[in-house]
Amino acid sequence: RLLRVPGVRPEQADHFARAVLGPDVRPDDPRRGGALALHLLTGAARDGHTVTPLPDVLDGLARLGVADPRRAVEAALDEGEVVPLTEEPGFEEDFGEDGGDAAPPEPEESLGVARWALAEEAAAEGLQRLAVTAGPLLDDAAVRDLRARLAEDRSLALTAALGTGVSILRGAPGDLSRTAVGIARAAAARGVRAAVAAPTDRAAADLADELAADPPAGPGDAGTGPVIASLHRLLEPAHDPSAAPGTVVYGRGEQRPFDLDLIVVADAAGLDVELCAVLAEACPDGAHLVLCGEPGALPPAGPGRPLDDLEASETVPVVELDATPPGDPVAALTEAVRAGDLPAVDAPGREVVIVPAADPGEAVHRAVQLVTDSIPRALEIPVADVQVVAVAAGGPAGTGALNAALKERLNPGPGAFGGFDAGDRVVVAAPLPHAALGETGVVTGGGPHGLDVEFPGGAAVLSRADAARLRHGWAVTAAQARGTRRPAVVAVLPDAGLSRPLAVTTFGLAVRHLSVVQAAGPALARAVRETGAPDRRTRLARLVTQ
């Protein structure tokens, strides 16, 4: 049970067991073996995998000193939290072109944590159901009328959205947001119940502002507009004390689906298998689901890669938007990085600033200087609109170190309310009923009643258990920041954990200004050129084709 606590290592749990149980402890206790098997699979899930080959699990158990790894796996299966996953090899892979007399190969035996394995199956079933039950949302004449006003790529995106149950839209963040809002607006103006789902309430507010600032294209587009909200709000989160830590129970689902015909998800590349399953189950039969994703961005923070798997399955239409020529230096740099290059960009208005740092300590110092002085003074962007983005939470230039330094300058205090003070910026590090992963807010007070936080979606009072899912939020990880753009971004990049997807995602968050605190030297350019996202072992691509 101790291995369920984040950060506890097997040797620590063993030491505790020996201290408490004394002579009664047995290293071959099947409960210990089962717990170690679950621990290995949970670690694989943290790396994004939903399935792990059985031989890999057996080897891992042997390295942990388990005398009978197969017995340990059986114990984990008996507990019900681990499930066996048998994958039948494809015929064409195994027999070649002529087949011959070769015997069929043995099925591949794998294991998965039940929580994520079952979610992946539910996501596949839901996506298949939507593809099968969908019909056209508008007649051919209406679609032709809408297409007449659009460029070819936008026309294809609109046609796919209105004509098929599930479609994928790829493009740069600005192109995606404009196209997503445009599709939903066009459909809503003709009586289709449409919604755009953003990653956070803050991102949804930005999309709503974009809709309001862009007048209708013609008199026929002036009808009721689409719903624009965070996916979290659309799913109607509910407080459930029995929910597993880090999970949220939603009111919308198979028994109570959306009252919508068209759902456009603005950053579907950030969906893990659990949230994808919840979304698919909440879509009623006949609804159309459009999944938007920035190419080359970071994979989801949780297990799986539903958007990439769905595209790889070749079962749904995929439309790639033609890139709008970069209109500013930030966009130009982001597009170059997406292509594997890290050029120097011309930024006459200091839209992009590279700040060298000799080591992580200097990187933290430079970031604090930028947030508290340089950016507000030189660019007149207030501190509230500046977001520091780091590679990871830990380490000398991680969010922990950055937030400690930023709090000391911006809002010093003793952490009177469970480590927080009134005025602290916080970020949701694990989903809450009150706010989605990555949502930021400001602490307004606290006491025996709980922690008072003002989120973009409104004020909330968090219990002590819920408040434990918050972290200081002046600096956040790229995984937490994704999908919510800010006027100014300070990217703090040390010499570890770098990749092209990390740079694409981080740089693409900046709207007006990007400062890159560069403590990586030549490692950054090398990572942009050579390091993509690590592979993930998943099953969704195969499941949706069955």
Image (cartoon, rainbow, N blue to C red):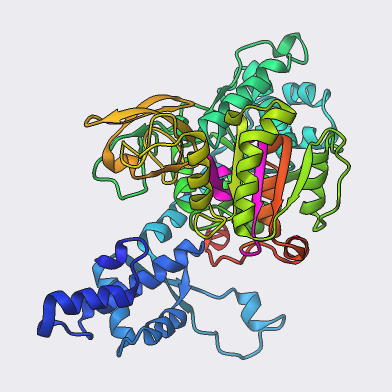
Tell me: 433 left or right of 134. left
Tag count:
0
Res. 464 image quadrant: top left
Q: Which residues are magenta?
A: 474-496
Residue appearing at x 64%, y 83% in the figure: 95
In the rendered view, tell whether residue 120 sits above or below residue 49: above
Picture residue at 25% right of the left edge, 72% below the top: 78
Q: Left or right: where does residue 273 sit relative to residue 444?
A: right
**Which residue occupies the extreme top position in the image?**
219
Q: Position of residue 34 (x, y in %)?
A: 28, 75
Visible in this render: residue 533? yes
Left or right side of 459 for 314:
right
Based on the picture, tell me whether residue 456 belongs to the magenta stretch: no
User: Picture coordinates of residue 492 (x, y %)?
Assistant: 64, 51
270 or 321: nearer the viewer: 270
Q: Give the vertical position of 147 relative to 311 (above or below).
A: above
Q: Is residue 491 magenta?
A: yes
> Would residue 294 be found to the left or right of residue 200 on screen?
right
